[in-house]
């Protein structure tokens, strides 16, 4: 095992897949000479050349669209969209094209593409560079949605995404790139659709993904000292969603807090909560609580930005509320 | 006797005003870089230094009640369109006294009171807004025009083409001002576009175009003036490509590996501010001492604005929920 940063783990995954499969290539804005806005593709241009590591124009629509077309015809593109917020520019290509082609064409085509992007708050970048939009894409059958929270998961999941024969939206977090974690020396894959119990516990189940997973772990640490044992689950893949792992935990604890950085209304938590109720309402000892962003755009001011999204304290308070 | 024809056309006080505005922008940006370095301002700030002649020249050619749409690199546009320095600087700092109450910051500087319809975090995000504002001008017969500032990178967004086609077809009073600073982040124009002069794309929409030296405030002004005159007569949009350069990196984390020191020097030698000051001195508009005075006064204005911004309070927590709906 060795320690790497999140961005390095992603960089390694790209390298290994570029080495393994000549059909894999990378394209996006500033992924070449610049090495990616957040450094994920650092050194790839030098090592793999401009044919396979393609700097594109600022044209999100055709970045995604060309990935779809290349994927349909035998390539395995890894396209990068610099911020999840910019997916809006390319929306048709994602949800009308990438997601639906296989089904519409009666299973006769496949779209093995990976769309990497990143989201989240934390850098004072305001309303168009700080969103957490994952829930939008859960409403589109045909897409897979992956959100790694640790370097280990980031590497293993990206490799799985690239090898998957479907369009995979892979959403990183801008505040996680510098975080460190252990990964094995050899090759490994983290399969899509498998949640992970990041911290076992017996009293309360907290489900959190991406950066909020770190917040949930911090909250669990504090709560442990106060005598509440929290089980923290990272779904890792939001679509498909591993309900088995979540339900196993819910049956044990009977109490659930769902945490996400996106807006509460129409969020991921609403979906998970409903599924828990559908699959196991009678195991619940208390109403499910959602901790999510306020239903407002992310403000730039450093005095406001942190108030828009969940804090560790809010998670702690939510867990305690289950007991009053 | 004034030898320079473009200088001869203008009033002395205007020439001095534009020189000072360019100084304002430069000192504003130097201050923003400093505030970023001090970590007083978080987040991204794309600095306009080097391109001052474009914003100032273009805004000098239109009226107070005309509109502009801006970009992610919007501080210069906001100042040139007459934004208050205090409010602009306070906005960059995320303060309640900012022109957007601290909610937008650098990326979303907007000041409707000066006709500035806003900077934009989305590259290309303003093309539609410009067309729509021009549609208002036409439908309400306002006798106003819209300047749509955009970068060479933004030129490759689909909506750039959609906007130009709509404006040309409906003869909307938009003036597309392409600030070609040779790079969209790290990608040079020749790696991102199939044409060297982005202006030639105007031909596809049967729209006239002009290519000007974006380091020359009077050249920019003259071109935009002609375009505005056409637009006001109902003759439709025009595209003006300004060849220019951004002096800093794309944003603060940019090591500028994609361009050479020689190229940077070539453009620094064409600095629009000292060159314009020199031109005014040579034509006997101002003396060397006056030039220094203008410079010093501009610097002080920015220091005052910064003091205002730093002293101003942050928004109250309740502001989080305000202004979501009208
Ligand atoms: C839709 C979208 N794509 C990408 C970005 C990231 N980005 C911000 S500025 C920029 C470069 C823009 O280049 P250009 O239009 O030439 O303007 P310049 O920065 O040179 O002023 C990029 C890629 C963005 N903000 N929005
Ligand atoms: Mg540019």
Image (spheres, rainbow, N blue to C red):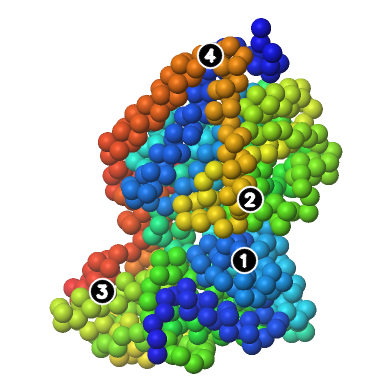
Residue A32 tag number: 1
Under circle 1, the secondary element is loop
**CB contact under 8 Å: marks 2 and 3:** no
Instruction: Between residue A116 and residue A27, name the one nearer to us.
Output: A27
Image mark 2: chain: B
Viewer-nearest of discs 3 and 4? 4
Residue at image mark 2? B183
Looking at the image, is B155 positioned above or below residue B220?
Answer: below
Left or right position of A229 against A92: left
Residue at image mark 4? B286
Same chain, labels 1 and 3: yes
Quarter holding residue B15: top right
**Which tag, 4 or 2, sits closer to the chain's start?**
2
Image mark 3: chain: A
Image mark 1: chain: A
- Answer few, some or many: residues within 10 Å of disc 4's Cα (few below 14, many 20 plus, some between 14 and 19): some
**CB contact under 8 Å: marks 4 and 1:** no
Residue occupying the far top of the picture: B1
Residue occupying the far left of the picture: A226
**CB contact under 8 Å: marks 1 and 3:** no
């Amino acid at each position: 095992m060795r320690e790497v940063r999140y961005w390095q783990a992603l960089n390694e995954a790209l390298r290994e897949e570029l080495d393994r499969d000549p059909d894999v290539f990378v394209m996006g804005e500033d992924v070449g000479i610049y090495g990616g806005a957040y450094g994920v593709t650092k050194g790839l241009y030098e090592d793999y050349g401009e044919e396979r590591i393609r700097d594109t124009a600022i044209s999100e629509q055709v970045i995604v669209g060309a990935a779809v077309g290349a994927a349909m015809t035998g390539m395995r593109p890894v396209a990068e969209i610099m911020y999840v917020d910019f997916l809006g520019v390319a929306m048709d290509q994602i949800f009308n094209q990438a997601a639906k082609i296989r089904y519409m064409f009666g299973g006769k085509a496949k779209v093995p593409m990976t769309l990497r992007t990143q989201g989240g708050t934390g850098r004072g970048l305001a309303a168009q560079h700080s969103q957490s939009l994952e829930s939008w894409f859960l409403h589109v059958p045909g897409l897979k949605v992956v959100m790694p929270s640790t370097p280990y998961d980031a590497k293993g999941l990206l490799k799985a995404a690239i090898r998957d024969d479907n369009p995979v939206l892979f959403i990183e977090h801008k505040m996680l790139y510098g975080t460190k974690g252990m990964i094995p020396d050899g090759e490994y894959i983290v399969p899509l659709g498998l949640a992970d119990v990041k911290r076992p516990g017996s009293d309360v189940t907290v489900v959190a993904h991406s950066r909020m997973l770190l917040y949930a772990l911090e909250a669990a640490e504090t709560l442990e000292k106060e005598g509440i044992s929290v089980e923290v689950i990272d779904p890792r893949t939001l679509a498909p969603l591993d309900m088995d792992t979540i339900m196993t935990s819910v049956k044990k604890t009977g109490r659930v807090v769902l945490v996400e950085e996106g807006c509460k209304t129409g969020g991921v938590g609403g979906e998970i909560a409903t599924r828990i109720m559908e699959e196991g309402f009678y195991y619940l000892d208390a109403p499910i609580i959602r901790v999510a962003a306020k239903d407002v755009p992310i403000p730039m001011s450093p005095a406001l930005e942190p108030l828009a999204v969940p804090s560790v304290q809010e998670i702690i308070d939510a867990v305690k509320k289950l007991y009053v | 006797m004034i030898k320079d024809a473009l200088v001869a056309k203008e009033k002395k006080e205007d020439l001095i005003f534009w020189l000072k505005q360019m100084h304002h922008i430069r000192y504003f940006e130097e201050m923003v870089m400093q505030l970023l370095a001090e970590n007083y301002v978080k987040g991204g700030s794309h600095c306009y230094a080097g391109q001052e002649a474009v914003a100032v020249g273009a805004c000098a050619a239109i009226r107070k009640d005309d509109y502009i749409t801006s970009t992610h690199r919007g501080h210069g546009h906001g100042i040139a369109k007459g934004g208050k320095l205090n409010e602009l600087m306070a906005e960059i700092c995320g303060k309640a006294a900012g022109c957007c109450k601290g909610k937008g910051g650098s990326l979303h500087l907007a000041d409707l009171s000066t006709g500035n319809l806003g900077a934009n975090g989305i590259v290309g995000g303003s093309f539609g807004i410009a067309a729509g504002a021009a549609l208002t001008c036409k439908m309400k017969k306002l006798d106003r025009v819209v300047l749509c500032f955009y970068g060479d990178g933004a030129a490759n967004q689909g909506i750039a083409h959609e906007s130009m086609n709509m404006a040309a077809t409906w003869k909307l009073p938009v003036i597309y001002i392409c600030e070609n600073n040779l790079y969209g982040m790290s990608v040079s124009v020749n790696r991102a576009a199939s044409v060297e002069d982005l202006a030639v794309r105007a031909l596809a929409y049967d729209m006239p175009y002009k290519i000007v030296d974006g380091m020359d405030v009077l050249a920019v002004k003259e071109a935009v003036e002609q375009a505005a005159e056409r637009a006001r007569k109902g003759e439709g949009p025009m595209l003006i490509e300004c060849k220019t350069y951004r002096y800093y990196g794309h944003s603060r984390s940019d090591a500028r590996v994609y361009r050479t020191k020689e190229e940077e020097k070539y453009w620094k030698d064409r600095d629009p501010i000292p060159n314009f000051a020199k031109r005014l001195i040579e034509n006997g508009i101002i003396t060397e001492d006056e030039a220094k005075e203008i410079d010093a006064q501009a610097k002080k204005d920015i220091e005052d604005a910064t003091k205002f911004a730093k002293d101003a309070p942050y928004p109250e927590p309740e502001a989080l929920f305000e202004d979501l709906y009208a």
